[in-house]
Image (cartoon, grey):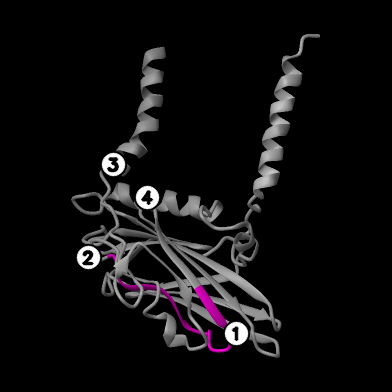
Amino acid sequence: MKQALIGAALLALLTPLLAQAEQFQASGGIFNGDDYGTSYAGAGGFTPLSNQALGQVVDGGNYAFDAFGFYNAGTDALDQSRQVELLSGNVYRFFDTFTNNGGSRVTTTLNFFGNLGSDGNELVSVNSAGLIVSCTDDGAGSCTGQPVLALVSGNNGLGQAAITPDRYNVRYTVSLDPGQSLSLLNFAFLASDLNGPTAEDQALAAATGAQLLNAPRLEGLSAQQVAGIANYTVSPVPEPASGLLALAGLGLLGLARRRPR
């Protein structure tokens, strides 16, 4: 009985790993105006059209996207800089900072846009606050062709996300005083078995999307960048000095516990 329980526990731990080992690998596909790579960082400027060819994802693998992840409205009066990366595990991260460099308060609705690769046949399995999971419908209620997508737009209600045939939009209504900045963070996760998407891939996309919603991946972002994120409630990233002090404190606590009475 004990061995059976141990075996069941090991299987439960290994199943997600085995499922991920069968996953296809996203190919980058981040278009920066010149070529395709796995990351982009740069300034967008005042013109809305200027960022469309900067830091959008084209394909991403298995035709997941046509052109995904740029702001196509609301940016006229703001300066924009963006950082787009393919993180490990088929996770695309879109980090955009908007600054009001004008002389008066700006209230605008920024629209984060994605042209999906499904060409209109959306099968949505999750549509909740901040998270949409979708795939291409085979006509019989199952996923086919392109990967299953987990699209994450924030956990504090600022982003209003919607998915329509072949389109993904997230609207953020923001107000910025002169000199003020804020940042918006979006994620897209791709799940697909090497032989095509399965029901397990839908479950994997839902689970990974929920993880990104509750604990967004912030690796590589500075404490200042994290502090400026407006569409997530996140724990602040500790400064290196405070992190060292915390480790030192834990070490002293361990020594105190080891001292004989």
Please say whether residue 67 is one of the residues in the magenta stretch. yes
Residue type at mark 3 is Ala
- Residue ID for mark 4: 89
The quadrant the N terminus occupies is top left
| Earlier sequence position, callout 1 versus callout 3 | 3
| Along the line of sight, the residue nearer the viewer: 214 or 186 | 186
Residue type at mark 2 is Gly
x, y (%) of residue 259? 76, 13
Question: What residue is shown at x 27% (from left), y 70% (from top)?
Answer: 118
| Earlier sequence position, callout 1 versus callout 2 | 1
Residue type at mark 1 is Thr
Residue stretch rendered in magenta on the structure? 64-81
Question: What residue is shown at x 74% (from left), y 26% (from top)?
Answer: 252
| Along the line of sight, the residue nearer the viewer: 100 or 120 | 100
Instruction: Determine crowd level at label 3: few under 14, some 14-19, many 20+ residues with C-alpha closer than 10 A.
Output: few
Q: Main secondary structure of the magenta part?
A: strand
x, y (%) of residue 192? 27, 53
